[in-house]
Image: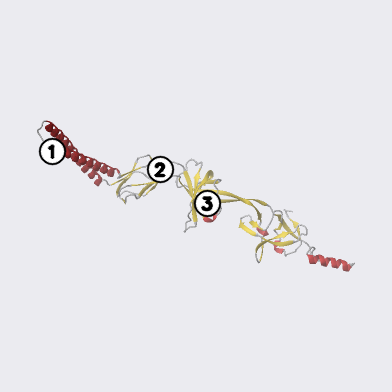
């Protein structure tokens, strides 16, 4: 009879289905693997800018004599903003006016000459050739008069170009000129924000854009007032990556701007993204094999453990998120895992029992 019992025990030990002689199951804490939707939150600091902006410049170059607005000023359409030295343009206008006066007098004289020649021709006191000559002189005077008018228009336009005016009702957000400065033609003098809303601009690390950026669910708050939150919506993501920083420029439209929000205000933007359900485990469940990360999984029938290789998606403050290797409902050892070896018998204790 003793031989039969010994043979049975040896057989069970060989199969790994029974504890060795005198082995006591190790008390360990066990968690039941559960899958839950994974929500990730990302927070970045950005800057409030105008949703639409435009730049203004002088069409001609010259020396700046006066700047009439300061940074942040609100201006109306056609309001003068800055002036260039206009001495040459004023001289050109006076010269063009004098030329127009002369051309006008010559034209009137040519008209009178033609009328006189036609009267004399009707009375037979002159020849048709003489009359035709006065007609040709009138046509030439008309051409000179039109040229003089065009010269005056150009001179007046050049004089008007020495004054920079607001293209529309807007706010000055950049001023690049100062009195005494020499500025070139078409060189940006000022930048304006049109009163068409705000947007928050962020430099987003490229790794965060591997998945699509959430179109909604972006919460914004000013750094000076973190408790005052307002909503945003992703409006534009640059297709280019900054080589120096490895970031991508992203713009978020501000949907309900709070009172007092201004251009240049620093803001914090928080976006949430929900992924497919994944298993999360505490750090104490982590172990490893020669091939990589693993966890101790408990056979619920035999209460014996075995190392289960896993693939880690990422690490978080509260634990680890697994991509694969553990199914929902699996029993995984947490505290006490450092004392285990394959086939070790365990018993469940702890708060999760």
Q: Which of marks 2 and 3 precedes in the sequence?
A: 3
The structure residue drawn at horizontal position 72% and vertical position 64%, both measured from the top left corner, is: 339
Asked whether the beta carbons under mark 3 and mark 2 sit within 8 Å of each other, the answer is no
Locate residue 199, reporting x and y percent: 48, 46
- Seen from the viewer's position, the closer of residues 294 and 172 is 294
Distance Cα–Cα, label 1 vs label 2: 67 Å
The image quadrant of residue 310 is: bottom right
Report how many numbered discs are placed on residues in the image: 3
Name the residue that disc number 2 marks. Answer: 171
Name the residue that disc number 3 marks. Answer: 44
Name the residue that disc number 1 marks. Answer: 129
- Seen from the viewer's position, the closer of residues 231 and 352 is 231
**Numbered disc 1: secondary structure:** helix
Q: Is residue 257 above or below residue 297?
A: above
- Seen from the viewer's position, the closer of residues 185 and 178 is 185
Q: Which of marks 1 and 3 is in front?
A: 1
Q: In which quarter of the image is the C terminus?
A: bottom right
Badge 1 crowding class, 10 Å Cα cut-off, few under 14, some 14 to 19, many 20 or more, is few
Left or right: 300 in relation to 151? right
Locate residue 46, reporting x and y percent: 49, 50
Badge 2 crowding class, 10 Å Cα cut-off, few under 14, some 14 to 19, many 20 or more, is many
Badge 3 crowding class, 10 Å Cα cut-off, few under 14, some 14 to 19, many 20 or more, is some
- Seen from the viewer's position, the closer of residues 249 and 101 is 101
Distance Cα–Cα, label 1 vs label 3: 88 Å
């Amino acid at each position: 009879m003793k031989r039969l019992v010994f043979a049975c025990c040896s057989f069970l030990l060989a199969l790994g289905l029974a504890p060795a002689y005198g082995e006591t199951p190790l008390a360990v804490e066990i968690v039941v693997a559960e899958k839950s939707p994974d929500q990730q939150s990302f927070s970045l600091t950005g800057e409030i800018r105008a949703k639409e902006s435009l730049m203004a410049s002088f069409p001609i170059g010259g020396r700046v004599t006066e700047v009439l607005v300061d940074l942040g000023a609100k201006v109306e359409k056609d309001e003068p903003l800055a002036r260039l030295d206009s001495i040459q343009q004023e001289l050109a206008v006076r010269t063009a006016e004098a030329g127009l006066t002369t051309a006008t007098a010559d034209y009137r004289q040519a008209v009178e000459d033609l009328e006189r020649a036609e009267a004399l021709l009707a009375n037979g006191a002159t020849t048709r050739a003489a009359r035709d000559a006065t007609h040709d002189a009138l046509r030439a005077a008309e051409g000179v008069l039109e040229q003089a008018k065009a010269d005056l228009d150009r001179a007046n336009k050049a004089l008007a170009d020495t004054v920079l005016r607001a293209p529309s009702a807007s706010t000055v957000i950049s001023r690049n000129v100062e009195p005494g400065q020499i500025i070139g033609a078409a060189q940006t003098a000022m930048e304006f924000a049109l009163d068409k809303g705000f947007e928050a601009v962020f430099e987003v690390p490229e790794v965060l854009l591997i998945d699509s950026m959430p179109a909604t669910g972006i919460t914004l708050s000013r750094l000076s007032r973190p408790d005052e939150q307002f909503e945003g919506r992703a409006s534009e993501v640059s297709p280019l990556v900054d080589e120096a920083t490895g970031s991508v420029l992203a713009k978020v439209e501000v949907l309900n701007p709070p009172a007092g929000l201004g251009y240049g205000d620093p803001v914090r933007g928080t976006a949430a993204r929900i992924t497919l359900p994944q298993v999360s485990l505490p750090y104490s469940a982590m172990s490893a094999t020669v091939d990589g990360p693993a966890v101790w999984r408990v056979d619920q029938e035999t209460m014996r453990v075995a190392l289960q290789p896993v693939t880690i998606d990422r690490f978080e403050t509260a634990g680890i998120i697994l991509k694969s290797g553990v199914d929902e409902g699996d029993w995984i050892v947490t505290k006490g895992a450092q004392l285990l070896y394959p086939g070790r018998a365990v018993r469940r204790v702890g708060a999760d029992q």
